[in-house]
Image (cartoon, rainbow, N blue to C red):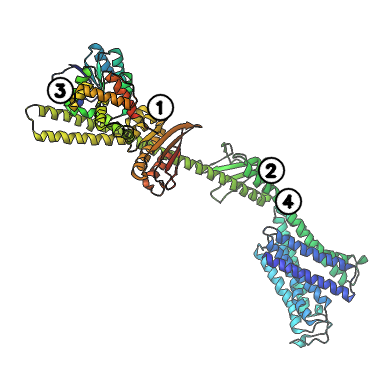
Amino acid sequence: MRASAMLLAALTLFLWAADVARQLQLGVADSGLAFYAVAGVAGVVVAVAVARQARGDRLALLIALWLLLSVLDDLAVDWPESRSATTVWMPAHGLVPSAYALMVLGYPSGRLRGRDDRLLIALAAVVGLVWMGAPLLFFRPTGCATCAPRVASWLYTGTTFDYLPVGQVSWAAFIVLGIAFVGLLVRRLRAAPPGARVTLLPLGLAVFFTAAEFVAQRVVWLGGWRSPGGVLDWIDRANALVLPLAILLGLAAIRRRRGPLGDFVVELSRARPGNAQPALARAVGDPTLELALWIPERGEYVDEAGMPIDVSAIPEGRALTAIGPPGEPLAALIHDERLLGQRSLLEAAGSAARLALENARLQAELRAQLTELRSSRTRIVEAADAERRRLERDLHDGAQQRLLALGLALQLMRESDVDSELLRQAEIELQTALRELRDLARGIHPTILSERGIGPAMRSLADRAAIPVTVEAGDERFPPAIETAAYFVVAEALANIAKHAEASAAAVTFARRNGRVLLEISDNGCGGAVARSGGGLRGLEDRVAAAGGSLRIHSEPGAGTVLRVELPCG
Amino acid sequence: MRLIIADDSAVVRDGLQHALEAHGHDVAATAADADELLEAVEHSPPNVALVDIRMPPTYTSEGLRAASAIRLRHPEVAVLVLSQYVEVDYALRLLRESPTRSGYLLKDRITQLAMLLDALERLDQGETVVDAELVDVLLHRPTTARRLADLTEREREVLGLVAQGLSDRAVAERLWLTQKTVETHVRHILAKLALPPDSDHNRRVLAVLTYLRVVDA
């Protein structure tokens, strides 16, 4: 779209230059030519400037189209004997009014808004084509005696088109359409909010200026008078400059409006949560503006400080603009009633605020969810640990003690008269059962951990390790969640080392550093632990994460494995 | 001999009382927690107090604290701490506070009455008792094996028994050696491990256990 607008603009500029050259060559150049040349360049410049604007390409295309048709119109005048120029000129000339209306009504977005607009332009195009197309098909052009007569020469009168019945009817139609056009424009100006009106006004004035000049010209012309000093001719020439100027002015007004909004978006993105209202008030230009945030859970609006706002009792002279999809507001602006005319500004400001607000709300929600997730994971692990402790206690208090008592009884039976091989066998079985139960219970939860802390518990693990394990740790106590996490990490890591690492020694260090606990388990084995990590290491990661810590593995093949765990001190 | 049994499990308490009385001992009192135990000892000091390490209210190591308290107030009363699990840490803590007349046995041993009775006997005679399994754990660690490389197999055997708290004479009996031979072995062992010669075999136990516990970096 932008490329075609640029192409049309370039073509227009080229034809314009050719036309100016032609006029100089013909010697018909007068003081108006300079004006004409400047107007052409100005029009093209405006078209290019509009095309370069964000979302301006559609409007630029319409402007370029109008300019092109206009210059084609002029070209034919300067090459009156050229049949091809005339053939091009006539439809171009017929379409200039509709292109003009299209551009004006399409401003500023480049799109037509209503059915009325579309109908008017279609009618103008049809009338224009009939007006210029009929002579093209049926008549010899004026001043071209050598031109071949057209198909239906019976209509040919030998005079200029304007006096033909087709021309008269077309003119009558154009006058009606012109009045309708002005009417549409007035309606649009009246309906526009003050903010939009400012941007529409220059164009509207330009159109009224053009219309007034046109009417004046016809009146003077029909009356056979001359305007004093040829003033109307000058105004006619000025027309070509007025429209580009008006478009530029209007766009500048839009930009001026958009400026504070842009600043607002930037300001909003920098503002701390809860500081949107002043920025919003500045952007909209209403210091009394209040921002009301909708809280779905409570079904009411609150201000940024969280105080409820009663939107059902808005005082006289104030108005409410809701932001967000209908039915599920995100926020509302309570502002001066007179600002209602600037709905687009309010909505734009609101949308910008909405982006920031929604963002803030999503982030807050996400943070809350993450926190909840983390704490629920911690709760699960803590519950599991508590369950393990309880299980160990139950085993210890119940089964283990009962089996011990049973063992005592068996011995006494054997020592008394019922000595038998069977009883001895039962005793051996019982001792095996006791040993297995003891290992099981200890694995579920080591008492030494809760009683003596992580240091002694890790040394106890080292006592049982298959390879020499040095333990560097004090007897300082830490919160149970931290100690348990660290203990199971060391237990699992030592088991992994024994199973996979082919190491001859391992070292465990546990130290407090910068308010965190650093746990490191290293071995001198074959490394490559990540590849063969399986579920064990991942389970450890979960456990450490649940305690609010992190776990990292450095395990280059052939260079041993280092497991580094950081935990909060609690 | 006169005994006091402290265990929070009634089944074990009664079973033990029954078994020990069946072997001619006088169970003067039983206690379900540390307070009851200390009260009973205060009331009528026994020869040996059998104390479960895990008792109310925290079910962790009340037994150890009670043992220290008894040894402090009644040096003539021996204490045998029964532990559900082998924890070197607990044993060392017990022996450090009171190197003589202290015993640390795995609770499972009460199903091997001969071992329990032997331990009571030795404690009553003023010896130190450390569970064989605990010594086993320490002796069979790879790091220990490396440090004990200079020792002959017989010397390692002697070291294990010394660590269990056996006197030279008891070691001699166990290994079918003369006491003199055992004493020579012990002197060699201590020299090889660079431990100070100490004729008191109870203090020796702590030194040896401590030595065994250390892991070379």
Residue B19 horizontal/vertical position (percent): 15, 24
Q: Secondary structure at mark 1?
A: loop
Residue type highlighted by circle 3: His
Residue A216 horizontal/vertical position (percent): 85, 66
- Quickly name the residue at label 3: B18
Which dot marks residue A282? Answer: 2
The quadrant in which residue B109 appears is top left
**Discs 4, 3: same chain:** no
Q: Which mark is residue A475?
A: 1
Category of crowding for the residue at label 4, using alpha-carbon neighbours closer than 10 angstroms: few (below 14), some (14–19), many (at least 20): few
The residues tagged by marks 4 and 2 sit, at their Cα atoms, a distance apart of 14 Å
Mark whose residue sits in front, 2 or 1: 1
- Position of the C terminus of chain B, as image quadrant, is top left
Chain ID of residue with mark 3: B
Question: Callout 2, which amino acid?
Answer: Arg
Give the number of the mark in front: 1 or 4: 1
Left or right: A521, with B77 as reference point: right
- Please name whichever residue, A126 or A482, is drawn nearer the observer in this view of the structure: A482
Nearer mark to the viewer, of 3 and 1 = 1
Do the residues under discs 2 and 1 have CB atoms within 8 angstroms? Answer: no
Rendered image quadrant of residue A505: top left
Name the disc covering residue A256, or none: 4
Label 1 neighbourhood size at 10 Å, few (<14), some (14-19), many (20+)?
A: few
